[in-house]
Image (spheres, grey):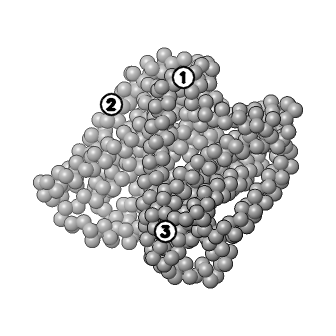
Amino acid sequence: MTRILIKSQLLQFFSSSFLDKKSGKRKSQISTIIINALTVFTGIMAINAGMLKISKELILPLHEYHLEWLYLLMISFLAIIVGTMISIFSTQEVVFAPKDNDLLLALPVPVRSIIASRLSYIYIIGGTISTLIMIPGLIIYYFNVQISVKSIVASVSLVVIVSILVLMFATIGGWACAAFISSNSNKNKKLTNAIMTFGSLAVYYYLFVKITEIFGQVMDNAGGLGEKVQSSNQLIYLIGRAISGDIGLLIIIWIVVIAVAMFLFIIFEKKYLGYITRQNAREAKAFDVGQIKAKSLTTALLFKEFKRYLSCGNYILNCSFGTVFMMVLSVFMLFEGNDIFKLIELMIDSEINYVPILNISLICIMISLNTITAPSISLEGRNLWILKSLPVSEWTIIKNKIKLHYIITIVPVLLFDVELLVLAKLDLYVSVMTILITMLYPLFTAGLGLFINLMKPKLNWTNESAVTRLNMGIIAAMVIGGAIPVIIMMGSIKIIYSYQIENATKPLMISFLLLETFAVAGMLVLLKTVGVKKLRKIY
């Protein structure tokens, strides 16, 4: 039975791209294979390029001090962190909140078989990511050390051990996320999703900064760090020796990893059934008619958009990069802003100052990372007809989706603007123009994402992640929205340097504002004409 469930889970994993979930018919195999192959190839190349660069920078100082074991430990640590972070949310969704749990539990299927089938999916995701990170690091490793049978056995074992550790950490993390969600009342579920999403982004950022700091310390002081680890932490040193070719120690590590994995599996098996049958319990509450408050149609639609946004963690996570990025940068600028601007002043010619244009362009690029409207029509799904049947015009529906995007984007933009202008000590004219330009640009990006989604909506999804994850529409909105300020910035700098124009900031900012005003007006007219007609025809 376990083998059948695992086979079923794997078939679902590999065949989901080839099957239309609404009609049950197979999609065009050739186009689907080509798209999937290009996506996988691009991802693999990006990971390989990044890991090869990191590995080359790490191996040189460590190899000089014969600390190859420390290099393998660091590559393994990186693979475990990245694989776990990517797998946690999938674990929470696939293992603890799948839609077919009730069906499986009604069958004479052992709980152990259900768990094994769920975890096989997570093992594929986490194991694939960790392996893709490990392989470039091992290739660089073998270019700098002597290849032997022991080192090859140790490397293969290391890849498998890392994938098992990723599975264990992802399962524990997913369990913690699921427990956190289920422990909150239904009233706080949307807020809980938002807190978890932004908390996860904060953890990602902290780990990124910490890993970068550790790698920098290793490259600056490899010898001293290796001696410190070897003298103060014998356990880490022994693990390093094992994965670099000590077969005896490697066998001990295998025994420990297998024992811990079996122990966790036994605990998980005992707790799993009680957990998944308890987490869907609902507390009965008496209905109070006094809680109902009347709202205008426009306010009610905007409120509905906010509830949709806050109820979907994937929506927040995948479509609010700009908001999170500006909030993080705002905190960073509070502590390091003065030093950064002093450095910029030393690097840039005071007679030809293009810093204001550079600031505006960078803010607009961050704004383009918000793609909240890009999946907003698709998120209505099969219930779009309900929204269209309300006594409101299509233009009102479009305006409220744009309002949601604008409100979520403009708050961190204004905070970042004020902080940037205070630290940069710009004059009143430049400050006002900066605020005006950066306040207008979210309207353009909101309209752009919505128009792209109107042209090709996807309404036949069964899971919200199908339309909120990075897809062609979201990527197109992000790329186009980010390319425009980049082109304007490069063109402005080229004009300044080609013609050696002094005090060119003011006319360039006026041109930027006028161009942006026409673009926003054109986008709104396009939505009010073509967009309304398209929304009217969508069923």
Disc 1 marks which residue?
A: 27
Mark 2 vs mark 1: give the one in front: 1
Quarter occupied by the C terminus:
top right
The residue drawn where x is 71% and y is 35% is 7
Residue 475 drawn at (x, y percent): 44, 39
Q: Is residue 101 above or below residue 161?
A: above
Q: Is residue 400 in view?
A: no
The residue drawn where x is 76% and y is 43% is 116
Which of disc 1 and disc 3 is earlier in sequence? 1
Question: How crowded is the residue under tag 2: few (<14 C-alpha within 10 Å), some, or many (20+)?
Answer: some
In space, the residues marked 3 and 2 are separated at their CA atoms by 61 Å
Residue 38 drawn at (x, y percent): 45, 37
Q: Is residue 169 in view?
A: yes
Disc 3 marks which residue?
A: 145
Disc 2 marks which residue?
A: 522
Question: How crowded is the residue under tag 3: few (<14 C-alpha within 10 Å), some, or many (20+)?
Answer: few
Quarter occupied by the N terminus:
top right
Residue 466 drawn at (x, y percent): 58, 34
Mark 3 vs mark 1: give the one in front: 3
**Residue nearest the viewer, comparing 260 with 415:** 260
The disc label shown at residue 60, or none: none
Which of disc 2 and disc 3 is earlier in sequence? 3
In space, the residues marked 3 and 1 are separated at their CA atoms by 48 Å
**Residue nearest the viewer, comparing 384 with 54:** 54
Q: Amino acid at mark 1?
A: Lys
The residue drawn where x is 52% and y is 55% is 135
Q: Do the CB atoms of the residues marked 3 and 2 lie less than 8 Å apart?
A: no
Residue 518 drawn at (x, y percent): 29, 35
Residue at the left extreme, as displayed: 499
Q: Secondary structure at mark 2?
A: helix
Question: How crowded is the residue under tag 1: few (<14 C-alpha within 10 Å), some, or many (20+)?
Answer: few
